[in-house]
Amino acid sequence: MANCKICLLPGDGIGPEIIAEGCKVLDAVGAKRGMTFAYTEALIGGCAIDACGTALPQETLDAANVSDAVLLAAVGGPKWDTTDPDAPRPEQGLLGIRKALGLYTNLRPVQIFSALADASTLKPEIVDGVDMMIVRELTGGLYFGKRERFYNEEGAGTNGAAGQRAYDTLEYREYEIERIARQAFEAARKRRNKVTSVDKANVLETSRMWREIVHRVHDEEYPEAELEDLLVDNAAMQLINRPADFDVVMTENMFGDILSDEAAQITGSLGMLASASLGDGVALYEPSHGSAPDIAGRGVANPLAQILSVEMMLRYSFNRGDAADDIRRAVTAVLDEGWRTGDIKDADTPADHVVGTAKMGDLVVERL
Ligand code: NAD
């Protein structure tokens, strides 16, 4: 593709700092591989609330819809934290854009860069060979169900007094489970062809339906894939007990949210993990971490998860495995040479090899 239209959503906190490095690397790999990129920047999250009173302005959705791919950094921060259910919150931008673009699949690769094997809090022999893909359902379940909060309700307080009551609804439809199951089996086909489906079928009706449908899709369409079921509490344990055994881990929205952060931690740094959110149209790419308000504005954030999101964008939206591989090789080389941002340095890292956000981006560009 000659000129790819990218919608940039820097968001809040470290977002603007890391997305700049993503673009730097994208332009460099484009120059090498004959691709050019045209960027349109739009607001999402806290900065959009400040400017427009909503976390997802219509202009942002319009910009995303006319682009070939969306590159997002992160949203949120203490400035916008609130328990007022009527106040706008930055995450509404994220949930809203996922829903509006129909991004029902979230792919999170969890791989260990060998230079960073020591960064994991798990023993090296446990993390050796970890290479899994978390496939999370992204537009259904508890995060999108009906929710409500009642105040001053008779009997909801202590000793029968009036108090508060709230509920969230966990709901799935058959087609939502069928399509995510297919995405997981398709992803597995390109890997080691093993799918672990995570649910809570001993308690939840949605999980019982999930399990039934996943098995039907497997038996009818992907019988050659290996399929195992795991209850979510057991999955949380097995992920740190035997992480290298997992290939594709497929699960519903909230379980996936939690388990993918747990899996991320196996690698030792959240600052290293990218994600892709795919649907039937424009796809969105973002780091797995948040806006890191504790280090925002200091130029020390790790831009590699953002840069690796660019790698995923080239692979999934532009079908350019060659350019994607260039980025992966460049990142691997930079790490092998011992360059580290603060979050991934260790006691053996020489002080002159601890670099900031922009320098890390420059190093990746040089290795390209
Ligand atoms: P976080 O991921 O922002 O930060 C967790 C810890 O990891 C912090 O110590 C942070 O400094 C560090 N960290 C994260 N990314 C890093 C990077 N690239 N380089 C170096 N260190 C990094 O999670 P949190 O602190 O729970 O949340 C902060 C804000 O981000 C909250 O407002 C939250 O709602 C939001 N959030 C947004 C997203 C998203 O945009 N997708 C995801 C999670 C959290």
Image: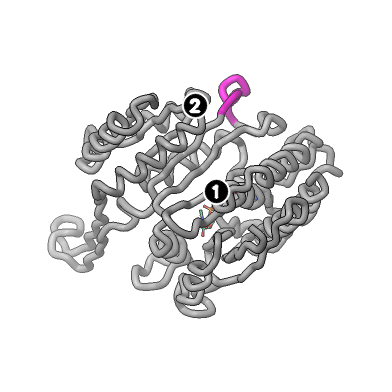
Asked whether, in this view, residue 314 is left or right of residue 225, the answer is: right
Dots 1, 2 in contact, CB < 8 A = no
Residue located 13% across and 60% down the image: 155
Residue located 34% across and 55% down the image: 143
* Magenta region, main secondary structure: loop
Hey, what amino acid is under mark 2?
Arg
Q: How is the image coloured?
A: one colour
Question: Looking at the image, which is closer to me, 240 or 113?
Answer: 113
Q: Position of residue 221 (x, y in %)?
A: 32, 33
Q: Which picture quadrant has residue 36?
A: bottom right
Q: Which mark is residue 192?
A: 2
Q: CA distance from mark 1 to mark 2?
A: 19 Å
Asked whether, in this view, residue 303 is left or right of residue 338, the answer is: left
Q: Is tag 1's residue or tag 2's residue first in the polypeptide sequence? A: 2
Q: Which picture quadrant has residue 169?
A: bottom left
Q: Which picture quadrant has residue 11?
A: bottom right
Whether the residue under disc 1 has CB within 8 Å of ligand 1: no
- Residue 209 colored in magenta in the image: no
Q: Position of residue 286 (x, y in %)?
A: 56, 54
Residue located 80% across and 48% down the image: 363
Count residues near mark 2 (Cα–Cα under 10 Å), then give few for <14, some for 14-19, many for 20+: some
Whether the residue under disc 2 has CB within 8 Å of ligand 1: no
- Whether residue 21 is visible, yes or no, is no
Q: Magenta region: which residues?
A: 121-130
Hey, what amino acid is under mark 1?
Tyr
Question: Looking at the image, which is closer to me, 21 or 319?
Answer: 319
Asked whether, in this view, residue 248 is left or right of residue 341, the answer is: left
Residue beneath label 1, please? Answer: 316
- Please determine whether, in this image, residue 150 is positioned above or below residue 133: below
